Amino acid sequence: MSVQALRSTFGHNCHWCGLPMDFAEPRSDPDSATIEHLNDATLGGVRKQKHRRLSHAICNQTRNEFKLQAERQFQRWIEARRASAAGGD
C-alpha cells in the first residue's frame, strides 16, 4: 500500500501527533509523510496492510529510536538479572 493510498484512507494528518504532513516529493523532510508500521516486523506488521498508517518521518524515526532504547534497557536488565543469579550460586 502506497503513501497516496493510505492518504486517501486516513487523511492528511500524522497518526501520532495529529499535525498535517508534507506529501511533496522527495520525502526527505522531517515533516514528510512516511508509512508507519504499528506492529513490528517480528509480529507480521509489515506485511499486513491493516497495521499501516501515515506519520511524519520525524515521528516515525523518534518512535523507533525510543523502542530501540527500551529494548537496549531491557537487555541490560536481563544481563544484570543473569549476573545476579550466577553470583548467587
Image (spheres, rainbow, N blue to C red):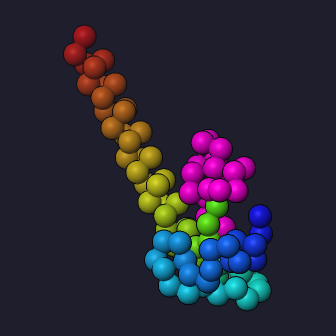
Q: Residue 29 or 82: which is nearer the viewer?
A: 29
Indicate the position of residue 21 as horizontal and vertical percent values. Answer: 60, 85
Q: Residue drawn at (65%, 56%), measured in percent from left and top? A: 50
Q: Residue furthest top?
A: 89
Does any portion of residue 29 appear in the rendered image?
A: no
Labels in figure, total: 0
Residue name at image x 43 percent, y 54 percent? 69
Location of residue 4 with respect to 38 vertically, above or below: below
* Magenta run includes residue 86: no
When asked about the image quadrant of residue 22, the answer is bottom right
Q: Quadrant of the N terminus?
A: bottom right
Q: Which residue in the rendered view is the most extreme toward the front?
A: 9
- Residue stretch rendered in magenta on the structure: 35-51
Residue at 43 percent across and 47 percent down: it is: 72
Q: Position of residue 26 (x, y in %)?
A: 76, 84
State the residue in front, 74 or 33.
Answer: 33
Q: Give the position of the C terminus as an image quadrant.
A: top left
In this orientation, which residue lies closer to the viewer: 27 or 55? Answer: 55
Locate residue 86 relative to residue 24 in the image: left or right. Answer: left
The residue at 72%/50% (across/down) is 47
Q: Is residue 7 left or right of residue 78?
A: right
Residue 25: in sight, yes or no? yes
Q: Quadrant of residue 9?
A: bottom right
